[in-house]
Image (spheres, grey):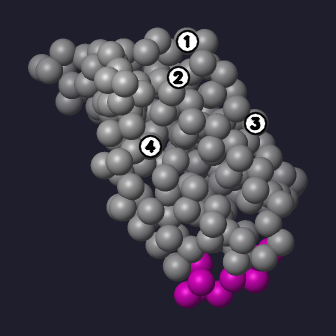
Amino acid sequence: LYVLCACALPLMICSGLVYSMFSLYMAEVLGAKRTQIGLIYMVGSLVGLLFAPLLGKLSDRFGRKPIILCSMASFVLIFILYSMARDYLVVYPIQILEGAAWVAIGAAVTAYIADIIAAEKRGWAMGVYQQTMSIGWVIGPAFGGFLSDIIGFRTIFLLGAILVGIGFILVLFLVKETHVTTR
């Protein structure tokens, strides 16, 4: 559990780092109006709503680790694409990938925890994972605002891609598959 949480922490820090500044980036740099910003966020959530069961099922079929790795690789790509965006309209397709990546990692990580933790301790274990998310959202926004003033929004996205890349490597080498796949 602690190894998994340590591997997920870079993504959680990155999400706090990036998303605390994301609306400002879309407005100030990409020229999105408030309505457009709301719609952009809605697209990612809608994809999550529609595809969460399917992505969870893929975790049952192919294993937890491959889905976690695919999700983290997707986030590396997402943050690189955000850094290259020149118009808010290109953020819509990126949000589609992002919505899928969030629900994929959410489904796979919680299933992973259920695989490795006895039933009577699963609530506690899910709490430890939630704590990891909160740590990321304590660290990330504090640095996100500070760093965006110093190095700019686009560089923040590249820094986020590097952080998630570190998490990807940690998962690749430290996290063992827990689920017998049903291929």
Q: Are marks 3 and 4 in contact (CB under 8 Å)?
A: no
Q: Is residue 69 above or below residue 34?
A: above
Quarter placement of the C terminus: top left
Label located before the other in sequence (4 or 1) = 4
Q: In the image, which disc is placed on residue 6?
A: 2
Q: Earlier in the sequence, mark 3 or mark 2?
A: 2
Q: Which picture quadrant has residue 97?
A: bottom right
Nearer to us in this view, 142 or 172: 172
Residue closest to the far front: 183
Label 1 near label 2: C-beta < 8 Å?
A: yes
- Mark 4 or 1: the one toward you: 4
Tell me the distance, in whole angstroms, between the alpha carbons under discs 3 and 1.
18 Å
Q: Residue at horizontal 50%, vertical 57%?
A: 99
Q: Which residue is mark 3?
A: 162
Amino acid type at image mark 4: Ala
The image shows residue 90, relative to residue 157, as above or below, that is below
Residue 4 spot, x, y in % from top left: 46, 21
Q: Amino acid at mark 2?
A: Ala
